[in-house]
Amino acid sequence: MIMRNDIIIQTKNVNFYYGDFKALVDVTMDFEKNKVTALIGPSGCGKSTLLRLINRMNDLIEGTRVEGEVIFEGANIYAPNVDPVDVRRRIGMVFQKPNPFPKSIFNNIIYGPKLNGVSKKRDLEALVEKSLVQASLWKEVKDILSQSAMMLSGGQQQRLCIARALAMKPDVLLMDEPTSALDPISTAKIEELIEELKRNYTIIIVTHNMQQAARVSDCTGFFYLGKLIEFNQTDRLFTTPDVKQTEDYITGRFG
Amino acid sequence: MKWRYFRQTLFFIIVRTSAFVIALAIGAFLVYIFVKGIGAISWEFLTEKPYDSMTKGGIMPAILGTFYLTTGAILIALPLGVVSAIYLCEYAKQGSMVRGIRIGINCLAGVPSIVFGLFGLGLFVVFLKFGSCILSGALTLGFLILPTVIGASEEALRAVPNTFREASLGLGVSKWHTTLRIVLPNALPGIMTGSILGIGRAAGETAAIMFTAAAFFTAKLPSSIFDEVMALPYHIYVLATAGTHIEETRPLQFGTVLVLVALVLGVDLIAIIMRSYMRKKKRW
Amino acid sequence: MTRALKEKIIKNILFVFALVSIIILALIIIFLFMEGVPIFGTISVKEFLFGTEWYPTYDPPDFGIWPLIVGSLVVTVFSALIAIPLGVLSAIYIAELAPPMIKEIFKPIIELLAGLPSVVLGFFGMAILAPWLQQTFDLPTGLNILNASLILALMAVPTISSIAEDALYSVPHEFKEASYALGATPFETITRVVVPAALSGISTAVILGMARAIGETMVVLMVAGGAAAIPESIFDSVRPMPASIAAEMGEAPFRSDHYHALFATGIVLFFMTLGFNLIADYISHKFKEVGSATL
């Protein structure tokens, strides 16, 4: 019997609609704590949609509808009395295109914590350092914290966005194709980072790059046309997939 | 957490109230003008000349005068404006010269209309000896609305997709012909919208025509561009402030105001509707 | 003639046409100076600008335009106090809060307000607002700073609102997404991310709105009261520069000192509004929004 960590997030029979279009069909899966789970599949398969479901970012789009449950720490985050703002405090997100605010590096990181009541200067400074260290960016920027974040390179900006998300001390970090807009060296740095981060955080990453999924993740879910086709430990899914469709995708027959 | 939402609700209330206040002010204004002015409107009012020190009769000469001035203004501003826009959009290389021209246009847009009036007085009325007449007024107004026309034309030209230009040039057509036959026709609706807005502005201008074209009373209708004219905005101003029977003519003042407002709003509304119609029916 | 040469000629002809705007601007300056500078033979620039007595029709006449300048500044400041909050907040409303249907109606309404001729607003101030003010505050006349400020605010709000709304609208969507993902509420996102990012555009909007108020003629001519004196309360009447020019030009004998003094006032007014516009232009270019990340 393979040891499994606690399940931190579960989706149960989730259907998702953009207006009349059903983008996710009956998705049921578990995400283990302190592991990296990758979501892969061809364009339009719903993997990003599922990711954004988990921190209720899809609420911001008009005309969307969710059926089913998403359980986080024992409670359904789509229950009517749940405030999405609360959910997003606990489940952070890093986007495909790095999107730092046009503020200083320091102010980018303390933006979220300040809104949650952290006010003492000492606490903020310690938080900034800790977050940047965790994001492998501290050494590069520790002397230029007051400079605009827009001055950083693409790879640095993305690590800043990771630090900014970590400063909220989330339990889960969602990453939506975090390296697809970056050069190979920055990509490698961030993949190393993910390996370290999973000690303290649970990571769910969407990627269209299969090699990346194979490199960084512990479990992988393969999606096609809104359905979860196969979900297994990464090395098993990539070497001996159970479903033929998975094998076709991995070997490049489509997508 | 509750405090965060309380702050938000308070802020949103203030924001919504501001928008509401503005809408209310505009609404009140239009209602007042309509209610007080509609009484004076009649077929005679719109087609006859005034008499009895303006206490009776109509405002037809003023309507005609406004029409002449506005037409003259757009005849001047449109060619100049479109050609300038074509140069800026299609031909100019981004450099300090172009930046200088743009700053010039922005500054021209910001010149107060009374200063345009003084300018028109100095150049057209006095220096060129045209005297106070339609020509001087139209030239002054034309220059006043020039930045509006240039701005709208440039926007319209820019909106034409580059792929059209590339296709034409790729077929060996010269740049000038590409501009003339492909870009300009596709930009025409936008240019027209901008011109219509310019017309609205010119029609409502008072300060620029005070010393360059307008007279409170002309015995005859204008017969040449060197004649003075009556004009709606000027008529309103004089009736309301310096006419000999201010109280008596009050209803007529409201009537004239209503005519001018209806004219300008009508023109602007046409432009706005045209613009949103074009946006929806884009052929590309 | 080769095609290349033809194209070059066309380009140069177009260039000359494009210069028209600058030529007009230059002509304005030339003629203002031509008719305005002669006054400085009679009176020094300092006396003209800072003299506190404007009695151009007395014998001997006084040509100090300081009261006129103060009049302009006072109504502009007070109208700003009203127009800036209303304009910026309504821009926030349109850009961030309004549901699409209301947006479709509200935007054209503001544009229509922008198109109203100033003489009409001035008339409104005279015929409807002034009597109301006179009654409500028990004043000898309703033509004063308060009236002018209210009507000028009504004129400046559309300018401020539409330019500020454009600025807010062009804040990249990614910034808002990042803010929400960090657990911020819409209010916090608007006030801490969107508005600061659009600040240069909003500043431009405010400055251009104020430039419009300072240069406005008909409104102040009809409702500000016309007293060329330095005011002591908002219920006093003033005579801003444009009002003076418009009111007196008709009576000033051709090329008299009065005539030249009015042109000189035009010079002052021109450069004041020019200054505002250049500042606005500078701000909007210097702090152009640095967009989202690139490689």
Image (cartoon, coloured by chain):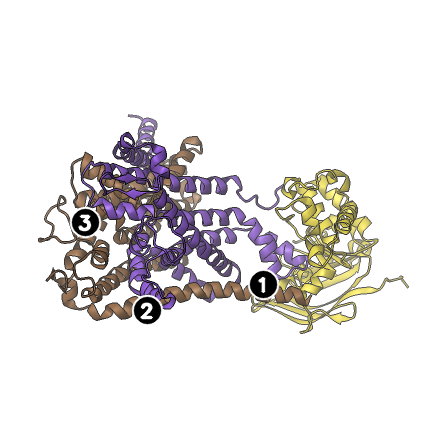
Chain colours: A yellow, B brown, C purple
Secondary structure beneath disc 2? helix
Going 77% across and 51% down the picture, which residue do you hit? A123
Which quarter of the rendering shows the N terminus of chain A?
A: bottom right
Q: Which residue is mark 3?
A: B214
- Residue B240 in the image: state x and y as whole percent: 23, 59
Does B20 sit left or right of B33 as displayed?
Answer: right
Q: Chain of mark 2?
A: B
Callout 3: residue from which chain? B
Q: Could you say whether the residue bearing mark 1 is in a helix, strand or loop?
A: loop
| Residue C190 lies in quadrant | bottom right
Judging by the rendered image, the residue that carries numbered circle 1 is A61
First in sequence: mark 3 vs mark 2: 2
Residue at the image point whose x is 58% and y is 67% from the top = B9
* Marks 3, 1: nearer the viewer: 3
* Mark 1 chain: A
Residue B204 % position (x, y)? 27, 54
Instruction: Check disc 2 and report the residue beneath it.
Output: B31
